Image: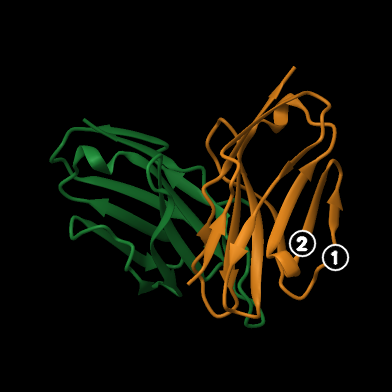
Amino acid sequence: DAGVIQSPRHEVTEMGQEVTLRCKPISGHDYLFWYRQTMMRGLELLIYFNNNVPIDDSGMPEDRFSAKMPNASFSTLKIQPSEPRDSAVYFCASSRRTSGSSDTQYFGPGTRLTVL
Amino acid sequence: AQKVTQAQTEISVVEKEDVTLDCVYETRDTTYYLFWYKQPPSGELVFLIRRNSFDEQNEISGRYSWNFQKSTSSFNFTITASQVVDSAVYFCALINNAGNMLTFGGGTRLMVKP
């Protein structure tokens, strides 16, 4: 089975531009997570979805960030306008909740975002 | 609130040495899950193991072994006969049964020198 797919793998943009990161979760997984990794803050959860519905977006840093999941096989994380402090690696992960227990989250390869 | 502490930020060993990565966690839940992930230099996060709070049996997978002790709230990871390919950042993480939010430790960078 294919793992979590993210695109692009690398993105370099200029401050003020809109950035869209994409994710395809593992087929059959009903949870999707967006994380951000920086040297200063480590790995932090931004938002997660269950059955395409956003459940907790308390980690989204500010209104410039938005995430959508229009269907079970696709999600986007958008930053508009982008700022240099948004430079980080953004990971998407997916999991499948079974028998009421928390299942393993499998991560995509990440998108390395650089905002100049 | 949950917390995961990996006190060792960097460890350097010579190939074939055994190395143990420490992980200490805090949670008020009685049912929870512990994980280890590996992040090699290429950057992806690779799942290694998942343990639930009711299973304290140690686990061995090849050169990897894990020691889970609820009495000390620890979930340590040992690599036996380390190899250069083991060089990576290793993350310990925790999730409770009711939630979906992984709490990660700060990671331990392991450098295995030839």
Q: Is residue B68 above or below residue B111?
A: below
Residue B84 point in image, percent of width and height: 72, 25
Q: Is residue B60 above or below residue A73?
A: above
Name the residue tied to disc 1.
B57
Q: Nearer the viewer, residue A15 or A28?
A: A15
Quadrant position of residue A62: bottom left
- Please state which amino acid type lies under the numbered disc 2: Phe
Residue B81 point in image, percent of width and height: 85, 32
Question: What colour-coding does the image apply?
Answer: by chain
Using the image, name the chain to which the residue with label 2 belongs: B
Mark 2–mark 1 CB contact (< 8 Å): yes
* Element carrying mark 2: strand
Chain B: colour as depicted: orange
Q: Is residue A54 above or below residue B84?
A: below
* Element carrying mark 1: loop
Residue located 64% across and 77% down the image: A101
Q: Nearer the viewer, residue B34 or A8?
A: B34
- Please state which amino acid type lies under the numbered disc 1: Gln
Q: Is residue B32 left or right of residue A91?
A: right
Q: Which badge, 2 or 1, comes first in the chain's sequence?
A: 1
Q: Residues within 10 Å of mark 1 (few under 14, many from 20)?
A: few
Q: Nearer the viewer, residue A100 or B25?
A: B25
Using the image, name the chain to which the residue with label 1 belongs: B
Inter-mark Cα distance, 2 to 1: 7 Å
Residue located 80% across and 71% down the image: B55
Residue located 76% across and 76% down the image: B54
Name the residue tied to disc 2.
B68
Residue B63 point in image, percent of width and height: 84, 40
Chain identifier matching the green colour in the rendered picture: A
Residue B99 point in image, percent of width and height: 52, 76
The disc placed on residue B80 is none
